[in-house]
Image (cartoon, rainbow, N blue to C red):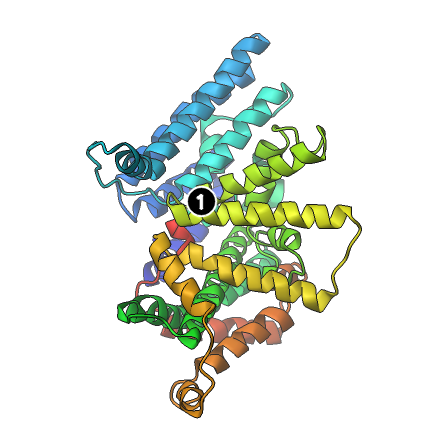
Amino acid sequence: MLFCSYEFVFLFLPIVMVGYFLIANRTRVMWARTWLVAASLLFYGWFKPWYLLIIVSSILVNYACVYMLERLKLSQPKRLVMMWAGIIFDLGLLGYFKYSMFVLANINLALNTHFPIFVIVLPLGISFFTFQQISCLVDLYKSRDEPRYTLLNYSLFVTFFPQLVAGPIVHHHDMMPQFDLPEGGKPNYLNLSAGLHLFAVGLFKKLVIADFLGAWARNGMDTWEKLPELTFWQAWFSVLAYVFQLYFDFSAYSDMAIGLGRMFNIHLPLNFNSPYRSCSIQEFWRRWHMTLGNFLMHYVYFPLGGSRKGETRACVNLFVVFLVCGIWHAANWPFVVFGALHGLAMVANRCWSRLGLVLPKVLGWTLTFAFIVVTYVLVRCTEMARVFRIWRGMFSLPELNWKSVTAIAQPVDMPWLYLLGALLLVLCFPNSSVRNKHFQPTLANGLATVTLLVVAVLHMSRISPFLYFNF
């Protein structure tokens, strides 16, 4: 079920919300949580019912490990074995569904073997709920003072539907205590109005801005694919359209997830903070998919040694983290190259900073944004041949004759104006999730919420999955 669908907006969300608060006020908290877990599983199984087998199996196996780590007086070596048993299961499940076809295809290519390759459908959200459960296992292994979770509470931590399919990657310390607050099961007018407003902003971003830009990206990268070569203008227009589509698409999902969580009195972590304003690649990754960055730092970079073993080792660890980041997103060579390039850029940024050198902000922003645009071709394409084809167009000399200029600026077909408008929105408007923290239920904000919802609903006639569902 999509956030931007009729059945979610007009049926699922109001029924689940009213049911949750009614049950929480009139019965035991356990039944309200049971209702929320059941609703979240329905939300997840709506895409494909067999997905439920995957997520329920994952929850049961991980909870068995959690239970033994929490409640059995195991020796430290046995606790280590139990933690790794859960992690190996999680990575094995993720590896089978996400990477087995990629690995077998490359083995066949490299060794001239003929292993059969079956088409395996990637379950939605498996990358996200896998990382969440790994973080819980590692934390429980490190500390014996962690709270004891029941199977119901643990299931709620994993399946809570606002963040289940595409993040943010939540930490059990951050989310679960909020469900224990006495006021958590009571409707809060401020949280409801602020959450609905942010959800409306996200819905508008997705259906009105991101999907519109997506049509330009598809036209450039798919329709123009049939041409012998892409021109300079075709390549840049299509890539920039995709760069802004991905921005508004992911920003929309982040807004909607945080807004939905707040409507249930749950404050989910900020996951997207205007990353295209960044003046360095390090700043970019502190603003883009922030919870993924936090996970990789705490559960990959620090265990590898972080910066404790010298500058050279720190640079190697940083590169490994971003290589993992690229591979985590998708199982194909463009994403491997994407992770490697961003890892090298982060290492270069670190070395530059160690020298005490600082670029002027305008130059830093220009170089950072240009690097993002060029490398996001790797995010859009699944084959390196297509990547090189688009890069050839982007780095070819542009046609500057009168015919090419007038073709770009036709009154009916002016993509450069839309791209300029998208850039202005990105650079000049306040971040919606950050601004929502100070939301006040005024008449103006109420009218804005209604207007955004009405306009978005009028654009809700087609199925439009979020781009991060692919990752």
Which residue is farthest right? 356
Question: Residue 310, relative to residue 38: is it above or below?
Answer: above
Task: Please give the name of the residue rendered at 38% of the width and 28% of the height, measured from the top-left corner.
Answer: 92
Q: For numbered disc 1, what is the local secondary structure?
A: helix
On the question of residue 175 being in view, the answer is no
Label 1 crowding class (10 Å Cα cut-off): few <14, some 14-19, many 20+? many
Q: Considering depth in this image, is 151 or 63 the residue closer to the camera?
A: 63
Question: Residue 86, relative to residue 40: is it above or below?
Answer: above
Q: Is 53 on the left-hand or right-hand side of 241?
A: left
Give how far across and how far down residue 169 sits, in percent: 52, 43
Give how far across and how far down residue 67 sits, in percent: 49, 19
Q: Is 31 on the left-hand or right-hand side of 372?
A: left
Give how far across and how far down residue 198 sits, in percent: 54, 62
Task: Please give the name of the residue rendered at 65% of the width and 28% of the height, measured from the top-left corner.
Answer: 305
Question: Residue 468, relative to residue 313: is it above or below?
Answer: below
Task: Please give the name of the residue rendered at 33% of the width and 32% of the height, measured from the top-left corner.
Answer: 96
Task: Determine the image quadrant of residue 97.
Answer: top left
On the question of residue 54 being in view, the answer is yes
Q: Is 450 on the left-hand or right-hand side of 56?
A: right
Q: Which residue is mark 1?
A: 336
Task: Determine the image quadrant of residue 31.
Answer: top left
